[in-house]
Image (spheres, rainbow, N blue to C red):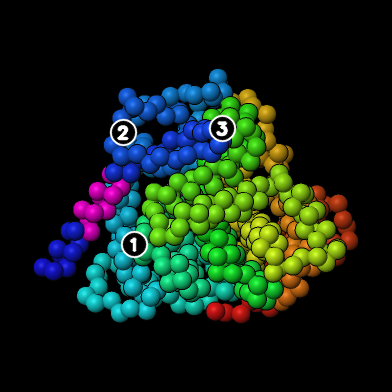
Amino acid sequence: MGIALIWSIITILVRWFFSKRRGAISYDSSDQTALYIRMLAVTNKTIKPSFVFTPGDVRVRSQVGFEPERRGSHPYLGVDFRTLHSRAESAGTIPARRIQRLFSFQRHLLSSRLLRGAPHLNPLHILDEDYCGQAKCMLEKVGSWNFDIFLFDRLTNGNGLVFLTFNLLNQYGLIELFQLDMVKLRRFLVLVQEDYHNQNPYHNAVHAADVTQAMHCYLREPKLAESLTSFDILLGLLAAATHDLDHPGVNQPFLIKTNHYLAALYRNTSVLENHHWRSAVGLLRETELFSNLPAEDSLSIERQLGSLILATDISRQNEYLSRFRTHLDENDLCLGNASHRHFVLQMALKCADICNPCRPWELSKQWSEKVTEEFFHQGDIEKKHKLEISPLCDSEANTIASVQIGFMTYVVEPLFAEWARFSDTRLSQTMLGHLGLNKASWSAMEPEASGSSEEGESEPGRATEEPSSRVLSQGSQES
């Protein structure tokens, strides 16, 4: 009877929580800050949301009867971002999704005790506890560069971002140091995960978890570990977890050419990155995660969080890379200086954001396929509506191999070469080693590369050989 009663209470609480959440409104204020107001029980008489997507939880909004409305959108474009990357589903899958949420909530309660090392009394035997045990074993190796985030996400029932981020915050002692309320923290992480669009092939919560794990690896590098403060580490982990929050699965040029309201709101400048930052601030304020800190400290966290997330704008890559290179050439980076530490955190987050080509082949290949799928899907939408096709998004003119080779050559290699100059460690050499092998594998798969060179025909077996992670030493020691 006791277990049945507990489960009934959990069910009621979860249903109430998700039924009360709505979307968010963004608007310009006098200081040009997009404020986010999480609303309860609003009606379409009060709000007329955009026809595409609302900052916040569009999945909940779509179930409460709002009529979509065009607002400053392309006159011939009727794309609903809620279904842009979704696949056909039967009506019968909706209850299954709700059940998964209930199971996920139950697992959150159990995992919070496990991660703190507390014994769990009278566990609810609804999920196989072997999965929780395997996930906990993986977390013991969270500092490994070979960490399989796809497996970890499956073992946590799609809650990899929540489990991973909570574990890292606890491992660094940040929960105790900043006296974070466990309930508020858990709610914040669950909301962050919920606000990623899992129908996106690439920009989803698994990508956010992967970036957070990579950020952890960088934070443990000697130069950073010796100089970063607890405040720096907290910022780095939060920025990694929220850096693509509420990503619509399309890029900035798409938003601009379709006259999307976010492009107008942020004046066509770092549109997505600004939105990710404001969405993160909205969740911080909604959950009151830092309500125990002085107001000026909370505002400082919000501002510096924005500075980190804005640095991930790929259009500003050369700007940051040139500055980084100049510092290294002049050997004037002083990590005792707060502004220099923050700049290094920006570079670390930039590396973590695009580190997929530096992972072992079996992981890197999956990420390459997912990001290219998202690009090509956008290109198909642009073709359908007779829009100019964005670079790398034309599936007829590009292949996965060609996209990856170009990305590695012009974006990834220059950045990680400079990072290796800054932090010449085993991890840096491992990443560059994987990068070289992965690039060679994609080059071998490119038809033009294999057809233009007769020399390669003398050793056909080696041309298509996949690089093995066993060839390279593990990038960082297991935690």
- Provide the residue span drawn in magenta: 10-19
Query: What amino acid is labelled 3 in the image?
Result: Leu
Residue beneath disc 2 = 42
Mark 3 surroundings within 10 Å by alpha-carbon count, few (fewer than 14), some (14 through 19), many (20 or more): some
Q: Residue at x 31, y 66 (%)?
A: 109
- Give residue 183's mark: 1
Residue beneath disc 3 = 265
Task: Please state if 113 lies on the left or on the right of 296 as rendered.
Answer: left
Disc 2 from disc 3: Cα separation? 23 Å
Task: Please state if 308 lies on the left or on the right of 116 as rendered.
Answer: right
- Of callouts 1 and 3, which one flags the residue occurring earlier in the amino acid sequence? 1
Q: Is residue 291 visible?
A: yes
Q: Nearer the viewer, residue 294 or 108?
A: 294
Query: What amino acid is labelled 2 in the image?
Result: Val
Query: What amino acid is labelled 1 in the image?
Result: Val
Q: Is residue 18 magenta?
A: yes
